[in-house]
Image (cartoon, grey):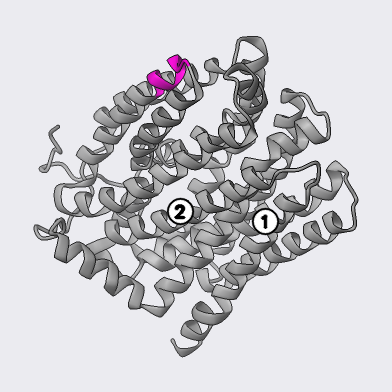
Amino acid sequence: MPSKPDVQAVPGLGIAILLTTLVALGPLSTDFYLPSLPAMTAALGTDVAGTQLTLSIFLGGFAVGQLFYGPLSDRFGRRPLMLAGLIIFLAASIACALAPNIETLIAARFVQAIGACAGPVLGRTVVRDLYGPKDSARMLSYISAAMALAPLLGPVFGGWLSVAFSWRATFVFLIIYSALQTAATWQLLAESNRHPDPTAIQPRRILANYATLLRDTTYRGVLLCNGLAYAGMFAFISGAPFVFINLFGFSPQTMGLAFGLMVSGFITGTMSSGRLASRHGPDVILTAGVVVGSAGGVVMLALALTGWQHPAAIMVPMWLVTCGIGFIMPNATAIALAPWPTMAGAAASLMGFSQMALAAAFGIFVGHSFTDSTVPMAAAISAGMGGSLLSYLLWVRPASRRA
């Protein structure tokens, strides 16, 4: 597809809205069908671990795909790769809606993830292209705040669709959503890569770029801060439907509302981050995020270990966790991409890969350890947030002090 190399993308409200919807493609693909998981388990004749694998396999495909989109976009541009990813996502969403069994659905979800990861990795890269290292943290915070409407409203709307029609209706919605995104991207998104690298897709160059990034102490630290925090949140995403519906007896609609209340912490964190960005650097805001998020994880695990099986024992500390993640993710991304203008795509790809690979591992753990207790989910959330704090203390904080 043509990349319109003679037209350069410029910042604007329309582009900001489009980038927000593209970055939201990943979380929308997971959060929207969460209330349907128990019904899907029964309809397809599988178990919790089998249904949960549709989440984890999605993250696996999401992780693998990001390793390629970044270097390819550094070479050929952001626009053609974004369009290719959206078309793949659209075709795979049709396959998901028509899947006759759990095996077909799992395979289709993997392909769907390969397409979906173009949105977040390239969307964030376009922000870095357009706004530069100084303003990208502020823009990423506002995009993340708007993007939080996906996990806030997605489970509510998805739960309603599942009850009113069936679990397949959630994938029909994704078909319509991705078709509209493809048309909007074709019309609105011009090329933003002003530093194309002809050697970016050479295998030796890709490995050398990734090695350079991982040798950088700050990059390595924020990569793990971001990845482990998201893994903790995904442990909640993958476990919450079964905890709230099977254990606490919530309906799919009520579970969606409860999920939205907890995710409102993420909106609070990202909006606060955007407002604070003009007065404080991303390092300061990242510090607040890892402290608040890890505190919420510790409280949740402590309550679970005491045997207090009550929705409030999950919802209150989880609000703190999502608030902390709202501080962590946009600022960790901005810190990670700032020093690398010529390989911003590779830097975003590696960061996205680690985020999704860790999340998939945490999701598999929760799926296979699910019992009639909240302890496994709380333990995974606490481990992710604690690991994020530890990564900050070991690598990010010493590097910022030296700077």
Q: Tell me the residue that label 2 is attached to.
A: 357
Badge 1, how many Cα within 10 Å: few under 14, some, many 20+?
many
Question: Is 189 located above or below residue 145 in the figure?
Answer: above
Location of residue 182 in the rendering, given as x and y in whole percent from the top left corner = 31, 27
Res. 35 image quadrant? top right
Q: Nearer the viewer, residue 217 or 353?
A: 353
Q: Which quadrant, please, contains the N terminus? A: top left
Nearest to the observer: residue 348 or residue 382: 382
On-image quarter of the C terminus? bottom left
In this rendering, is residue 382 above or below 119?
below
Q: Residue at x 30, y 29 (%)?
A: 88
Decide if residue 30 is on the left or right side of residue 8: right
The quarter of the picture where residue 119 lies is top left
**Majority SS type along the magenta span:** helix
Residue of label 1: 381
**In the image, residue 161 lies in the stretch drawn in magenta:** no
